[in-house]
Image: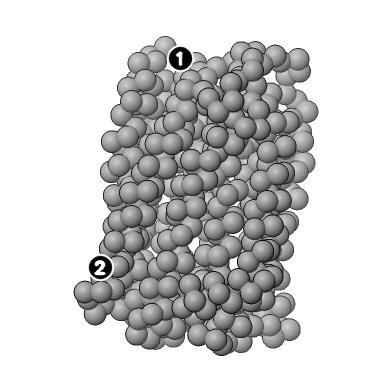
């Protein structure tokens, strides 16, 4: 499972694309979940209240899962031998237990009522949100479990297996939502939460089953050279900045929820934001898929950085262009009205923030590329500071736009998010350049046949 800078394969744009494609398909399938469930909820009773409650519950669930999000990157970067696999697995199980307890504590009436009051949730939205969160209780643990085993498979050069698990997840999610839509009288927010939980739990089980060959191979490497100190202290030192980065980053959506609740058109903004965000996520997810690809293929000494950078630029431009084609044409009305089921007033409200989202897919690819450089170098602290800067910029810019200038809440939210992401991207340029300048020079790589991802030595 290990490799050296001197013997690593040289990657063509085609081979990178073929390695990236199954992971991109995985993110695209997950990106479909949001629009699909929003469309189901929008066609049930009380769509504004249920869309708002589903959006807020989903935001809190994302916040609870934040510490486990980077387990896929950690497994891709760190699992070299039996010792690192076993220790990171124990670390993973302890972490998912902790985040589940945190979400459970949020659901106690005393805590939840204070949080709902702090973010100014309307009473009816708050009531539905808490019930939806109970249904989402398995979500963070299942996410952490499957991301660890998916990282092991990516490390082993098996990204297609990750995509197969996601096919099962999306299929079960859609089947659950459709069945409950047709055969129950549950509120839409409850149906959306139940569909998400069912899908991700199925994917977690499937990921563990499909990871068996990769686990067997890594357990056979008893005397390997681990990426870092195989002890728990080394893992924690590597991982806690990544977890903090995710925690701060995923705090953005609850933060924006708080801001939109106090800005013009609060209920309408809370209803529209998850729909607009879901459309943007379809294109931003292409960049999210790139992070593990770059970690796996760039090389321990960043010897393949030029090939990976070239692919990143192409991918970023293409993904932003795709969003522009939807947001700037009549397809926007078709998407928000016909597909998502919003009424005409909410469709008009969604157009401007969708246009503002256009640069974000390119920035997502850039961020994944920057993060991969620093994760490979084990310089994870810089990622945390970039995220702090991003959230800080949002916290400053939204009140200016939404409260002082009176912009509609959802428009102010997307504009602030755009400015914050730009600040975070720019901050990471300097540490990335420093790391690339200090890499060993003169490494030689063997060519890699087009479309044949490595099964070992990928990092």
Marks 2/1: CA–CA distance: 49 Å
In the picture, measured across the screen, residue 220 lies left or right of residue 66, that is: left
Q: Position of residue 253 (x, y in %)?
A: 53, 66
The image quarter containing residue 277 is bottom right
Is 354 situated left or right of 155 in this image? right
For the C terminus, the quadrant is top right
Q: Looking at the picture, does residue 291 appear above or below residue 275?
A: above
Please name which of the two marks, 2 or 1, marks the residue nearer to the observer: 2
| Residue plotted at (34% across, 76% down) | 188
Q: Which mark is residue 158?
A: none
User: Which residue is the site of mark 1?
Assistant: 224
Secondary structure, mark 2, is helix
Please identify the quarter of the rendering in which residue 221 is found.
Answer: top left
Tag 1's secondary structure? Answer: loop
Name which of mark 2 and mark 1 comes first in the sequence.
2
Q: Residue at x 34, y 40 (%)?
A: 207
Front one among 455 and 246: 455
| Residue 143 in view in this figure | yes
Q: Tag 1: Cα neighbours inside 10 Å, few (<14), some, or many (≥20)? A: some
Q: Position of residue 230 (x, y in %)?
A: 45, 24
Q: Nearer the viewer, residue 9 or 262?
A: 9
Label number found at residue 179: 2
Residue 321 in the image, given as x and y percentages of width and height: 69, 57
Image location of residue 322, percent across then percent down: 64, 58
Q: Is residue 396 above or below residue 24?
A: below
Q: Residue at x 36, y 44 (%)?
A: 165
Identify the residue at horizontal 73%, vertical 84% (top origin). 405
- Category of crowding for the residue at label 2, using alpha-carbon neighbours closer than 10 angstroms: few (below 14), some (14–19), many (at least 20): few
Q: Is residue 209 left or right of residue 143?
A: left
The answer to whether one can see residue 150 in this image is no
């Amino acid at each position: 499972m290990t490799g050296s800078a001197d013997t690593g394969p040289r990657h063509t744009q085609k081979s990178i694309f073929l390695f990236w494609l199954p992971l991109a398909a995985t993110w695209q399938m997950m990106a479909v979940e949001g629009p699909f469930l929003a469309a189901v909820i929008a066609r049930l009773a009380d769509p504004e209240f249920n869309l708002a409650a589903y959006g807020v519950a989903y935001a809190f669930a994302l916040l609870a899962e934040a510490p486990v999000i980077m387990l896929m990157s950690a497994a891709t970067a760190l699992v070299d031998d039996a010792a690192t696999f076993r220790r990171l697995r124990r670390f993973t199980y302890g972490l998912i237990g902790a985040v589940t307890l945190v979400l459970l504590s949020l659901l106690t009436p005393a805590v939840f009522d204070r949080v709902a009051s702090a973010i100014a949730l309307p009473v009816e939205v708050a009531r539905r949100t808490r019930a939806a969160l109970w249904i989402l209780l398995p979500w963070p643990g299942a996410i952490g479990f499957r991301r660890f085993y998916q990282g092991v498979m990516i490390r082993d050069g098996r990204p297609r297996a990750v995509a197969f698990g996601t096919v099962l997840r999306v299929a079960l999610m859609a089947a659950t939502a459709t069945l409950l839509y047709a055969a129950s009288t549950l509120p839409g927010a409850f149906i959306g939460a139940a569909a998400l939980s069912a899908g991700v739990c199925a994917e977690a089980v499937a990921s563990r089953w499909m990871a068996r060959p990769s686990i067997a191979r890594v357990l056979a490497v008893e005397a390997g050279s681990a990426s870092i100190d195989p002890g728990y202290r080394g893992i924690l030192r590597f991982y806690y900045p990544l977890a903090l980065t995710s925690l701060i980053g995923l705090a953005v959506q609850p933060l924006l929820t708080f801001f939109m609740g106090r800005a013009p058109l609060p209920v309408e903004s809370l209803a529209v934001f998850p729909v607009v965000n879901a459309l943007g996520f379809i294109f931003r997810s292409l960049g999210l898929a790139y992070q593990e690809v770059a970690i796996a293929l760039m090389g321990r000494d960043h010897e393949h950085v030029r090939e990976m950078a070239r692919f990143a630029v192409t991918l970023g431009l293409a993904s932003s262009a795709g969003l522009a084609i939807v947001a700037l044409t009549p397809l926007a009305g078709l998407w928000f009205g016909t597909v998502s089921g919003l009424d005409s007033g909410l469709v008009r409200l969604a157009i401007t923030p969708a246009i503002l989202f256009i640069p974000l897919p390119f920035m997502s690819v850039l961020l994944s590329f920057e993060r991969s450089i620093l994760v490979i170098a084990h310089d994870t602290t810089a990622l945390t500071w970039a995220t702090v800067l991003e959230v800080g910029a949002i916290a400053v810019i939204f009140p200016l736009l939404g409260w002082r200038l009176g912009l509609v809440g959802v428009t102010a939210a997307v504009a602030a998010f755009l400015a914050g992401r730009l600040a975070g991207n720019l901050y990471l340029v300097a540490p990335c350049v420093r790391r690339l300048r200090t890499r060993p020079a003169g490494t030689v790589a063997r060519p890699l046949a087009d479309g044949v991802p490595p099964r070992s030595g990928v990092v």
